[in-house]
Image: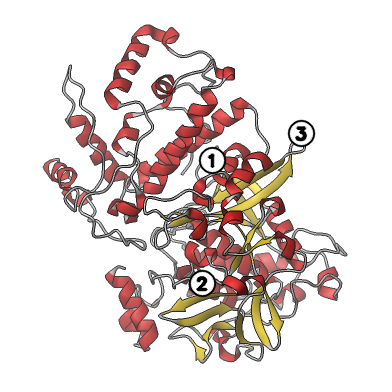
């Protein structure tokens, strides 16, 4: 945990003056460490654990008043037309949430003509591109946003040193009252009433603003350039919420909750593959005390053969607009063992036992006078107990047959896009281990696709000659749980250039020497930093920092993963030979983007 994050948490818990604790002029929250996800539910997983008393309406901490409930279908509010459903739809609110997610329109990412994200539609006719966000915060933003718009009950729970902390429509509270120095949200404005007093055109033309909120962020590099050059997450939330209490609450929720909290049975539940629908999420967990990845399911459909298809989107750290992935790329995600499979990580932990896989939000209901996070009627048949490791662990294999195949050319293009997306991210953030892993996972699939009859049984070396780049060898895959580089999110594009220039400087004509891997050696990055200083670029070399939860921060030497590629010198020799042979040196049927620089729809 970084010093700044420790200070932020201590300030909240001890009630120090905000001005003395802030990571910014007026904000004590940004950069705080996410709360502990708490213990497994075990037997309570079938019903949920009792939360705050239903008599706690919030008072000064109230974010929004609950006027509707998730299972209602025939109340006046439930019968009205909504953001993605007609009047008298007969749908409950959980189904309407799925309809809203399904309705999100695919658009180009900001500044790109090919990479895709989505546009968020609001109940007031406003549309806005998806915000730059880390992977967990995408899902964390969408669900309470919908709940706040339609005044539905919502809460998540985390643990602060053994004390349960509830983040919900009633505010941020423990059983004894407001938690630390978190806000009394009732002091902020709620302009929801304007929707009933103004026409849609008038409302959009006179959208109320919370200028204090608009200055605030959640995490470093969360700029939102499609709003304005200096806009951050607070400005984005201000644009989609009339209720500024909700906007401020969701910002703090995004800070204190992450993928481990989403994996917790206290907030979500494990879902059978056959129940997959829009609004669910696929979670990766790499280790019980390490990082993960959250992908939101945007589209579920059926192909011409009657097989299920799915498409997911994910943010990243540092934040990016969610990347909308193809059916082929999404199937690759669902079939990975990191999504709760039965294989083990480098620590010997079984993935199925550490929280990954297909999840659905729990819904807040009142039972015996208390709020309980449980599931909808009808979801019992789709639920998997969080201690049923075998059923949880079988899901990646089930998805291999449940999700339909796509044409070989589409598969190839999807994996090439994943490779180029990962490279593009590494060019901006060269310390990213997740991007290295995504690139190599995509190459593994590409070897399989191009090794088929359809592409003339290309072998691994032929594929590498066509599609590998030297930078892949410099940014080799590392073992996440055993490499301190993987916690470092603040590396820069300038550092990428320094690293590659250093690798080039070591080349000798007529002699092949594998380039140095960018990783920690002897506790640091001395050779790369020394080169930067020698080139007059010492100020561009950023010092290592633990920018996320980092149990491996003390390792001296990062651990290189077992690589699947052709060795560097063998690759270089074959690549040079292919270039000397001219066009005939390329394998047949390599596709329209055979150039090593190819990769359709490249994006961050």
Location of mark 3 (residue): 305
Q: In which image quadrant can residue 78 be found?
A: bottom right
Q: Which quarter of the image is occupied by the N terminus?
A: bottom left
Q: In which image quadrant can residue 204 be found?
A: bottom right
Residue 115 shows which numbered tag? 1
Q: In which image quadrant can residue 114 be found?
A: top right
x, y percentage for residue 360? Answer: 64, 61
Residue 196 shows which numbered tag? none
> Residue at the location (68% across, 37% down)?
404
Task: Answer yes or no: is residue 386 visible.
Answer: yes
Of mark 3 and mark 2, the one earlier in the sequence is: 2
Q: In this view, does 406 lie above or below 154?
A: above
Secondary element at tag 2: helix
Q: Is residue 100 left or right of residue 576?
A: right
Label 1, label 2: how many angstroms apart (C-alpha)? 29 Å
Q: Residues within 10 Å of mark 2 (few under 14, many from 20)?
A: many
Closer to the camera, 489 or 235? 489
Eye-nearest disc, 3 or 2:
3
x, y percentage for residue 228? Answer: 48, 58
x, y percentage for residue 59? Answer: 60, 91
> Residue at the location (31% across, 33% down)?
473
Secondary element at tag 3: loop
Of mark 1 and mark 2, the one earlier in the sequence is: 1
Eye-nearest disc, 1 or 3:
3
Closer to the camera, 281 or 112? 281
Location of mark 2 (residue): 253
x, y percentage for residue 308? Answer: 71, 42
Q: In this view, does 297 lie above or below 415?
A: below
Eye-nearest disc, 1 or 2:
2
Q: In this view, does 281 lie above or below 15?
A: above
């Amino acid at each position: 945990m970084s010093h700044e994050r420790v200070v932020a948490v201590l300030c909240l818990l001890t009630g120090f003056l905000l001005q003395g604790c802030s990571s910014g002029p007026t904000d004590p929250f940004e950069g705080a460490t996410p709360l502990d996800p708490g213990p497994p539910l075990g037997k309570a997983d079938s019903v949920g654990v009792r939360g705050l008393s239903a008599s706690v309406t919030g008072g000064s901490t109230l974010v929004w008043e609950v006027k509707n409930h998730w299972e209602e279908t025939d109340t006046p509010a439930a019968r009205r037309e909504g953001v993605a459903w007609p009047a008298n739809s007969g749908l409950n609110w959980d189904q309407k949430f799925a309809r809203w997610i399904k309705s999100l329109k695919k658009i180009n990412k900001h500044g790109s003509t090919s990479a895709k994200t989505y546009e968020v539609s609001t109940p007031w006719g406003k549309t806005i591109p998806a915000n730059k966000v880390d992977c967990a915060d995408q899902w964390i933003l969408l669900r309470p946003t919908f709940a706040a718009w339609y005044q539905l009950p919502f809460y998540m729970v985390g643990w602060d040193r053994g004390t349960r902390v509830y983040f919900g429509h009633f505010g941020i509270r423990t059983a004894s009252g407001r938690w630390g120095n978190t806000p009394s949200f009732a002091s902020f404005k709620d302009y929801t009433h304007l929707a009933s007093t103004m026409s849609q055109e008038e409302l959009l033309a006179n959208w109320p603003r919370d200028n204090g909120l608009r200055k605030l962020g959640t995490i470093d590099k969360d700029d939102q350039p499609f709003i304005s050059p200096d806009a951050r997450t607070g400005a984005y939330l201000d644009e989609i919420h009339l209720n500024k209490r909700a906007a401020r609450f969701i910002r703090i929720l995004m800070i204190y909750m992450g993928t481990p909290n989403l994996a917790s049975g206290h907030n979500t539940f494990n879902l059978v593959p056959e129940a997959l629908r829009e609004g669910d999420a696929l979670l990766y967990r790499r280790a019980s005390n390490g990082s993960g990845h959250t992908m939101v399911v945007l589209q579920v459909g059926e192909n011409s053969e009657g097989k299920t298809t799915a498409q997911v989107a994910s943010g990243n750290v540092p934040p990016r607009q969610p990347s909308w992935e193809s059916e082929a790329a999404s199937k690759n995600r669902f079939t990975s063992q990191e999504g709760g499979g039965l294989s083990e990580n480098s620590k010997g932990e079984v993935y199925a036992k550490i929280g990954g896989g297909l999840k659905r939000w729990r819904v807040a209901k009142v039972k015996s006078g208390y709020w309980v996070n449980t599931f909808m009627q009808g979801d019992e048949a789709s639920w998997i107990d969080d201690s049923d490791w075998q059923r949880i662990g079988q899901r990646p294999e089930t998805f291999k047959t449940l999700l339909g195949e796509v044409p070989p050319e589409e598969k190839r293009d999807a994996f090439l896009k994943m490779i180029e997306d990962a490279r593009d991210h590494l060019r901006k953030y060269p310390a990213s281990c997740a991007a290295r892993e995504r690139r190599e996972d995509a190459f593994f699939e590409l070897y399989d696709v191009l090794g088929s009859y359809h592409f003339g049984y290309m072998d691994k070396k032929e594929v590498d000659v066509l599609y590998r780049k030297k930078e892949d060898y410099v940014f080799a895959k590392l073992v996440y749980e055993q490499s301190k580089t993987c916690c470092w999110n603040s590396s820069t594009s300038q550092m990428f250039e320094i690293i590659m220039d250093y690798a080039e400087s070591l080349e000798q004509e007529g002699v092949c020497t594998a380039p140095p891997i960018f990783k920690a050696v002897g506790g640091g990055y001395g050779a790369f930093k020394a080169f930067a200083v020698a080139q007059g670029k010492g100020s561009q070399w950023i010092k290592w920092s633990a920018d996320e939860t980092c149990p491996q921060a003390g390792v001296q030497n990062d651990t290189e993963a077992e690589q699947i590629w052709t060795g560097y010198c063998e690759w270089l020799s074959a690549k040079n030979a292919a270039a000397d042979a001219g066009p005939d040196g390329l394998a047949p049927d390599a596709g329209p983007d055979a150039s090593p620089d190819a990769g359709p729809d490249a994006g961050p």
